[in-house]
Image (spheres, helix red, strand yellow):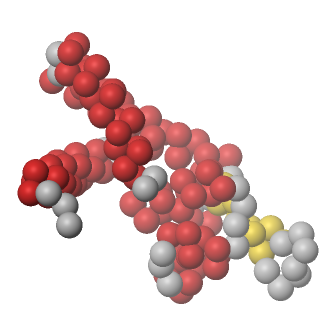
Amino acid sequence: MPTPEAAVIAAELRTAMGRLTRRVKDEDSIPLGQAAVLGALDRSGAMTTSDLAADQRVRPQSMARAVGLLMEQNLITRRAHPTDGRKSLVELSDAGRDALEAERGRRAGWLAQAIEAELTDEERALLARTATLLERLATR
């Protein structure tokens, strides 16, 4: 059972992170679900639609729709699976990689500007240390 202090910190942190995440998403031009698929393909490389669905914790039918939309936009391509002729792999196209990098740049750019505009040097140093702690919590 967490201490009352830890419970208060957790609630405040969850609220603040949720608000920050929603604000950063305001900079997005690619719908969140599609950006998540592009990000997964960028991190993990080519995947089957089923593997993508499992990775994103969505139903295979939902992922098939997302893959179809991304293919229509030429952001991903499909190729034969090298060892299983019944399957195919989807992967980022050059246009998809460019779109994902632009999306990440918009998000990071907004956040970097906000950090510079709102935080003192001391607060920036504290935020840098906090990022390490948040990463540690995320991997627990």
* Residue located farthest toward the top when viewing the structure as drawn: 121
Q: Quadrant of residue 82?
A: bottom right
Q: Quadrant of residue 49?
A: bottom right
139 or 14: nearer the viewer? 139
Tell me the quarter of the image containing the C terminus: bottom left
Tell me the quarter of the image containing the N terminus: bottom left
88 or 74: nearer the viewer? 88
Instruction: State whether residue 121 is above or below residue 94.
Output: above
Residue 39 x, y percent position in the rendering = 54, 53
Taking the spot 52% from the left edge, 46% from the top edge, the residue there is 100
128 or 32: nearer the viewer? 128
Does residue 7 appear in the picture of this structure?
Answer: yes
Q: Quadrant of residue 18?
A: bottom left
Residue 17 x, y percent position in the rendering = 23, 49
Instruction: State whether residue 64 is above or below residue 106.
Output: below
Taking the spot 53% from the left edge, 62% from the top edge, the residue there is 37
- The answer to whether residue 86 is left or right of residue 66 is right
Taking the spot 28% from the left edge, 20% from the top edge, the residue there is 125
Instruction: State whether residue 104 is above or below residue 51.
Output: above
Does residue 117 appear in the picture of this structure?
Answer: no
Taking the spot 48% from the left edge, 59% from the top edge, the residue there is 36
Instruction: State whether residue 116 is above or below residue 51.
Output: above
Residue 70 x, y percent position in the rendering = 56, 65
Residue 118 x, y percent position in the rendering = 15, 24
74 or 102: nearer the viewer? 102
| Number of numbered labels in the structure image | 0
